[in-house]
Amino acid sequence: MAIEPFLGTTAQRAYFGTVVLQAVIVLAMVGVTFGMVDNDVELSISLKYKTLPCYLALFALAELFEVFMVFDALRLRNIIQLFGITLFHLALMVMAAIQVGQTRTALVWRTAAQCAIDFDLIQCDGPGTLFNRIRPFLIVVPCIIGASLVVLAYFLKELYSEFGWAIFHVVGANPRMKTMYQYYQIMICLLKFDFFFFAGVTMQLLILVLQTESAEFGITITAIPIVLLLLILCGWALQREVKWIMSISLVLMLASLTYFYKLVRFYQPQNDAIYATTRASLTIFTIMAFILLFSTFTVGLRCFSDFDKGLAASKIHSAPTRPTLQTKESSKLNETEGVPLGPRISIE
């Protein structure tokens, strides 16, 4: 069975096209929402209003990240990454649904009784108010993501069959090698999601609370390229099986778990006003980042134990293309290494 080229099947094109289409629609809805609020409200006058820049930045980052991840997964025939993307898509739907309530909290400051006495189009809820005008755009986002999730799940089943054969061409039929290679794919996938969730938490904190002149702002900004470099080095060491770099990466990964002390700060009474409108999304992002980082550390230990067991070549050539049979001359070159096994499939 030949391996189809990148975007060479209906399932691949449909999966990628669905993600791109929903990303365009979602970004348009989020952009319209932000534009309507920005026209009526001075966003810098209150921390509550910073929910909207967070919302826009978070979904812009998430949608671009998802498109990149789908492109990367289809190019590498990585079905495990596609499963992760589908779960990520589900998480986006939940986040979009949460944003409806958080946006209302940010905009609607007055109670119904106060609005009955002194009605305000910005700080009240009701016909003609700002929140009432942007509510349809907020609601349509989780609906679009949910509808596209059904389509992605359908085509994921077809891609599972297609890419299962691709993995066979990389590592063969050896169950032990297949298991090691699957753990390698899981690790690479986790490293990519680690960076997104870390960047998501950091970006929200930078927009919300950190002042440009504070030391914490500088530390947070500096941490972004350092973490990115750490994850890249970890992925490189994992692929090339460089033990000393992998060991350092795992130790730093474990130390990085202490960064999530910030979760406690979200619920401290003195910080109630700061995080009132973004506490839910920040909590979800922080907990997800912690779980992913700890999972990455655990899977990393498993992958480290698989070093020097014959998987290195398969890691380097992990994106199979349409296979070709070796010629008789090339087969004869391998006779000195053992009994010839007949025509072999080359993945190089």
Image (cartoon, rainbow, N blue to C red):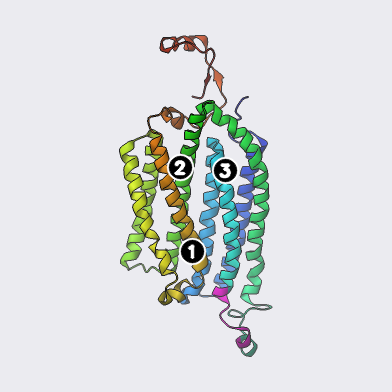
Disc 2 versus disc 3: distance between alpha carbons? 14 Å
Residue 280: x, y in percent?
52, 66
Disc 3 versus disc 1: distance between alpha carbons? 25 Å
Residue 325: x, y in percent?
55, 17
Which of discs 2 and 3 lies nearer the camera? The answer is: 2
Q: Earlier in the sequence, mark 2 or mark 3?
A: 3
Q: Earlier in the sequence, mark 2 or mark 1?
A: 2
Q: Is residue 5 visible?
A: no
Disc 2 versus disc 1: distance between alpha carbons? 24 Å
- Residues packed near mark 2 inside 10 Å, few (<14), some (14 to 19) or many (20 plus): many
**232 horizontally vs 129: left or right:** left
Q: Is residue 277 visible?
A: yes
Q: Amino acid at mark 3?
A: Leu
Q: Where does label 2 land, which residue? A: 187
Q: Amino acid at mark 2?
A: Met
Q: Nearer the viewer, residue 164 or 317?
A: 164
Furthest residue in direction bottom, as rendered: 117
Name the disc covering residue 283, or none.
1
Q: Residue at x 63, y 43 (%)?
A: 15
**266 horizontally vs 219: left or right:** right
- Residues packed near mark 1 inside 10 Å, few (<14), some (14 to 19) or many (20 plus): some
Name the disc covering residue 82, or none.
3
Which quadrant is home to the N terminus?
Answer: top right
Q: Amino acid at mark 1?
A: Thr
Q: Examine the rendered structure and indicate whether residue 261 appears above or below residue 155.
A: below
Which type of secondary structure does the marked residue at label 3 adopt?
helix
Q: Residue at x 54, y 31 (%)?
A: 167
User: Is 187 a magenta residue?
Assistant: no
**309 horizontally vs 283: left or right:** left
- Residues packed near mark 3 inside 10 Å, few (<14), some (14 to 19) or many (20 plus): many
The stretch in magenta equals 105-114
